[in-house]
Amino acid sequence: MKSTQDRTGAKREPLTRERVVEAALRVMDAEGLEAVSMRRVAREVGVEAMSLYNHVRDKEDLLDGVAVRVMAEFGFPDEDEAADPIGYGREVARAWRRLLRAHPNVIALFATRHKPFGDVESLRPMEVALRALTDVGLSAEDAVQAFHVFGGYIMGYVLMETGQMFGPGDDGGADVEALRRTLPAEDLPNVTAALPWLATCDLDAQFEFGLDLLLEGLRARVAAAQPAGLGAAVGRRRS
């Protein structure tokens, strides 16, 4: 396909579905999901909005393309880790967090989707997560429930860390100190005591702390349901 020229006479790359989806993803990352419209994306690629309809059916199709594009970035853990389901599951959870941190606005997009992914590659991250959970010893039904619990934790955590009220930042420490001076410690003794830790919380360490709680709960559940010794043996190695 030959390049075309814009109104200034400069050469322009041919418009493709991939270019349109990439442009929509850039807009979503920079300006939020609500900013993604056919007109805004058309402006991003330097064409009229009607030109997009040669490559996407409508806005829903465009957003579906964005979701699929984001899922294509999922960083699959090394298969060598799969011998230890708990350790492998930890790496899968970390990969989900990395993906969502790279595109935090996609969480809102996932929340508004009313249909599942329909292609193999987009479903593969779910496949590896469910495999890790069933390899631990969960039934298919319990694996789905655990998948939702871990997914909810990871999505919620990314929302918290990318829009946190407290934490490291340009003015985070100063804001917390100013708040501490104005709070009535007698009415909010626990909040007041926690403020220094809220201001200096290491987000990576905090994520791992929460992940530990979930994994230990999973380990305990499996141990209670399996013959003696099996649950303790599962995932003995920690990464």
Image (cartoon, rainbow, N blue to C red):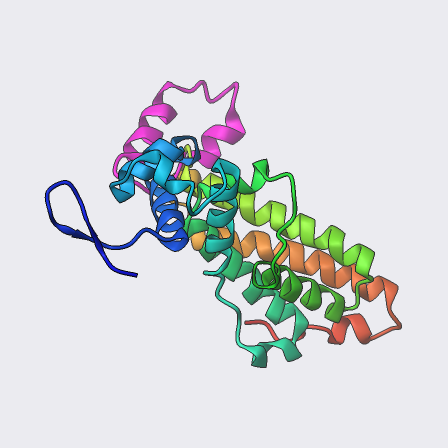
Q: Which residues are magenta?
A: 166-195
Residue nearest the observer in this picture, 37 or 237:
37
Percent coordinates x, y for residue 193 in the rendering: 47, 33
Quadrant of the image for the N terminus? Answer: bottom left
- Residue 225 in the image: above or below residue 179: below
The question of residue 115 being in magenta is answered with no
Question: Would you say residue 82 is visible in this rendering?
Answer: yes
| Secondary structure mostly taken by the magenta-highlighted segment of the chain | helix
Q: Position of 197 compared to 121: left or right?
A: left
- Residue drawn 62% across and 59% down? 123
Question: Would you say residue 202 is visible in this rendering?
Answer: no
The quadrant in which residue 48 appears is: top left
- Residue drawn 51% across and 26% down? 189
Residue nearest the observer in this picture, 22 or 146:
22
The question of residue 194 being in magenta is answered with yes
- Residue drawn 38% across and 43% down? 24
- Residue 128 in the image: above or below residue 56: below
- Residue drawn 47% across and 36% down? 194
Percent coordinates x, y for residue 168 in the rendering: 34, 43
Residue nearest the observer in this picture, 28 or 84:
28
Percent coordinates x, y for residue 49 in the rendering: 35, 35
Q: Position of 19 compared to 159: left or right?
A: left
The quadrant in which residue 238 appears is: bottom right
Quadrant of the image for the C terminus? Answer: bottom right
Residue nearest the observer in this picture, 2 or 101:
2
Percent coordinates x, y for residue 156 in the rendering: 55, 42
Q: Position of 82 compared to 161: left or right?
A: right
Task: Count every numbered label the image shows and give the total.
Answer: 0
